[in-house]
Amino acid sequence: MTDPIRFGDLYKESADALKPLPDGEYPATVQDAEATTSQNGKPMIKLKLLITTAAGAKKVIPTQMVVSVENPTALAIFFRQCEAFGIGSSFWSNNATLESAAAVMRGKALRVVLGTSEWQGQPRNDVKNYLAPLGGLQTGPATAPTLLGTGPAPAGPAGPSPLPTPAPQPTIGQPTVAAQPTPPTGESVAF
């Protein structure tokens, strides 16, 4: 005979799963990233982020990064957010696609700043900012796959190079302030 299902316990567990995490900064890992199109027909990357709390609890947060080609400020934010994944100018200047960016994002560790908003009358977490992981990116900058016959020329002979100077890292416990793009005069930007 099997044990009876304890629906009261299941009900409580399911209710706890819908509670948003407190607003703040969290370490995250990209469980999945997919290049797709928004309901408005804009290109975007859908992400599933595995968030880990200080107590070790884990929660999956779905989110997306939309490409608004008609809005230079929104584009600047999109590209700045991509830098948290190690995707910078060298990646995009190498005939990259949104699909190749999504492929690079999968499995990446980073930090996210979570806020709370309301969706269908219920509070939920949403990602307010993406940040590089503490200690910097693990695998170095990402490069887009090169198409046959395209891409940068091979490097010349390697010579001695100076060791890179590590970038200053925030101290744990201190708030991290992300730079915001400056809108053109007379415009206001809501984030």
Image (spheres, helix red, strand yellow):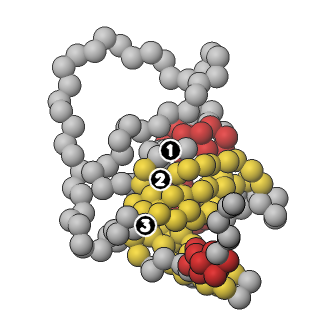
- How far apart in space, not on screen, are marks 2 and 3 (Cα)? 13 Å
Amino acid type at circle 2 is Thr
Quarter of the image with the N terminus in it: bottom right
* For discs 1 and 3, the disc positioned in front in the rendered view: 3
Q: Where is residue 114 in the image (x, y as percent from the top left)?
A: 48, 73
* Res 130 seen here: no
Amino acid type at circle 1 is Gly
Amino acid type at circle 3 is Ala
Is residue 52 left or right of 190 when viewed as pictured?
left
Q: Do tag 2 and tag 1 residues touch (Cβ < 8 Å)?
A: yes
- How far apart in space, not on screen, are marks 2 and 1 (Cα)? 6 Å
State the residue position of label 2: 29
Dot 1 lies on which element? loop
Is residue 22 left or right of 8 when viewed as pictured?
left
Q: Name above or below for residue 175 compared with residue 96.
A: below
The single residue placed furthest to the front in the displayed view is 1
* For discs 2 and 3, the disc positioned in front in the rendered view: 3
Q: Position of residue 139 (x, y in %)?
A: 38, 37
Q: Where is residue 153 in the image (x, y as percent from the top left)?
A: 48, 18
The single residue placed furthest to the top in the displayed view is 157
Q: Residues within 10 Å of mark 3 (few under 14, many from 20)?
A: few
* Res 55 seen here: yes
Q: State the mark number for residue 107.
A: 1
State the residue position of label 3: 57
Dot 3 lies on which element? loop
Quarter of the image with the C terminus in it: bottom right
